[in-house]
Image (cartoon, rainbow, N blue to C red):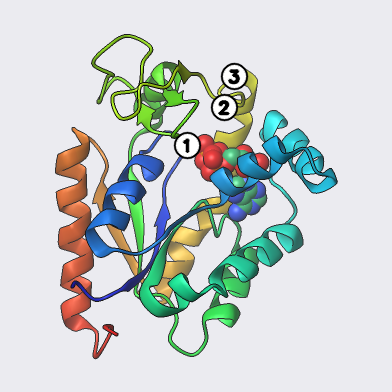
Amino acid sequence: MVPGVRLVLLGKQGAGKGTQCVRLSRHYVVPHISTGDMLRSAARSGTDFGRQVAEYMRLGELVPDEVMIQVVEHRLDQHDTKNRGFILDGFPRTVHQAEALENLLNPRGLDLVLDLEVPTEVVLERLASRRVCSVCGSIFGIDNPPRRGAICDNCGGELVQREDDTEDSIRRRLELYASSTEPLISWYLDRRKLAAVDGLGVPERVTSRLIRAIDNRRHQLPDVGD
Ligand code: ADP
């Protein structure tokens, strides 16, 4: 069994974080923690909390830091993450969230933060073609089109466009990425936690690059296994 790992994936909307996190989570046998998926599932549940976060998401605004930090703290406190580790997708998104994460993870901290690099023109093209399975959440797009029209290759579910993949929301999310999340790249670089990985090309090739970066880092760490 491969040892566990504690990772964060950074990258613009449409950089391929969701697709890559699913693949990495299978490879390293660690849970994929997507704050976007958690919030979408809360929104579907129709609770007061769900209704509040749904509005932020529809507009492409960030859910307040304190709310997100509580959500993530609760998830990181579960057995699977404690035993094996995790891959965080969508958190942290602000320096304040990154600081809170450091406090939550003390003393061991993260093993590595991966920045999945894709130019803005490419993410815009990918977002326009992005379709997600309404049943299992699998993601398809120009780099990995579904085999049969609007039907999921994995479960046969109907493929739909994400509710927040509208032009206005995409523009706002990319703006917020640049102003609030991109500063994390130098923040983690200063802490010697960052590896930049080219996110262009078919998903398999990107996964190999990510695994290479993670395994390189693991060889440098004293003892990351369990
Ligand atoms: P994307 O990266 O394409 O914006 P996600 O699925 O990661 O999509 O997130 C969807 C929405 O959920 C965001 O636009 C935001 O409203 C909310 N969200 C997710 N994670 C966070 C976070 N860490 N902090 C604040 N808001 C968040």
Q: Are marks 1 and 2 in contact (CB under 8 Å)?
A: yes
> Which quarter of the figure has residue 121?
top left
Depth order, front residue of 72/135: 135
Q: How far apart are marks 3 and 2 (CA)?
A: 6 Å
Outermost residue to the right: 48
**Alpha-carbon span between mark 1 and mark 2:** 8 Å
Is the CB atom of the residue marked by disc 1 within 8 angstroms of ligand 1's nearest atom?
yes
Tag 3 residue = 166
Residue density around tag 3, few if under 14, some if 14–19, many if 20 or more, within 10 Å = some
Q: Does 26 sit above or below residue 77?
A: above
Q: Are marks 3 and 2 in contact (CB under 8 Å)?
A: yes
Q: Give the quadrant of residue 185.
A: bottom left
For disc 2, the marked residue is 170
Q: In which quarter of the image is the C terminus?
A: bottom left
Q: Which residue corresponds to the image point at 41% horizontal and 66% vertical from the top-left?
A: 86
What residue is pinned by disc 1? Answer: 13
On screen, residue 59 versus residue 167, left or right, reads right
Residue 125's place in the image compared with 217, above or below, is above
**x, y percent for residue 191:** 42, 77
Left or right: 211 as drawn, with respect to 196: left
Could you tell me residue 21's position as x and y percent? 35, 50
The percent position of residue 218, horizontal first and vertical second, equals 21, 76
Residue type at the position of mark 3: Thr
Q: Distance between the residues labelled 1 and 3?
A: 12 Å
